[in-house]
Image (tube, grey):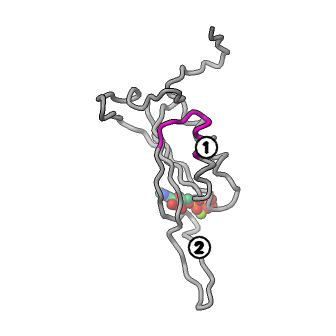
Amino acid sequence: MTKKIEAIVREEKLADVKDALRQAGIVGMNVTEVRGHGRQGGIILAGRSGSTQVDLLPKVQFNIVLSDHNVEKTVEVIRQAAFTGQSGDGLIFVLPVDDVIRISTGERGHDAITYEGDIDTLPQSNGRTRVVT
Ligand SMILES: Nc1ncnc2c1ncn2[C@@H]1O[C@H](COP(=O)(O)OP(=O)(O)OP(=O)(O)O)[C@@H](O)[C@H]1O
Ligand SMILES: [Mg+2]
């Protein structure tokens, strides 16, 4: 089963989250710039000529398509890297993905998002230590 993680984080956390994902073995991903607001509805900027409501705040969105069994780990990696504990830290959405097609080869599904060294390529851990010789 393939899932998509859409993680909306603070702009200044872009490098931290990217590095943490890389370290966790996430190879395939993309990032988009988004603007939006959560439950506070934006922020109010106080200026000399009164205050203005800025209701669409810039954020960065990480898009990662990956196998089901790597979702929880990846969510934790993102949370840790994006966390400040303050309001506005962001949100992580997890969505089902019906199919993936690699254009150059026609590979589909899991095969299409398999990269050298990616956690999706590594054998699924069964909780026991495996001795590789
Ligand atoms: N329901 C939603 N659907 C899509 N995007 C959303 C939704 N809610 C928030 N967002 C996006 O997620 C970003 C994160 O918002 P934010 O961190 O302020 O969340 P929050 O729910 O208000 O929690 P917090 O209390 O931490 O501020 C928003 O700036 C917006 O881009
Ligand atoms: Mg908020």
Tell me the quadrant of ligand 2: bottom right
Residue at 55 percent across and 82 percent down: it is 52
Looking at the figure, which quarter contains the C terminus?
Answer: top right
Per the image, the residue denoted by label 2 is 43
Q: Position of residue 15 (x, y in %)?
A: 60, 50
Name which residue lies at 53% across and 54% down: 8
In the depicted structure, whether residue 89 falls above or below residue 62: below
Q: Is residue 107 left or right of residue 16?
A: left
Residue 72 magenta-highlighted: no
Q: Is residue 57 above or below residue 115?
A: below
Specify which label sits upstream in the sequence, 2 or 1. 1
Q: Which mark is residue 39?
A: none
Numbered disc 2: secondary structure: strand
Q: Amino acid at mark 2?
A: Ile
Distance of mark 2 from mark 1, alpha carbons? 29 Å
Residue 23, position as x, y percentages in the image: 62, 36
Would you say the beta carbon of the disc 1 residue lies within 8 angstroms of ligand 1? no
Residue holding disc 1: 19
| Highlighted range, magenta | 18-29
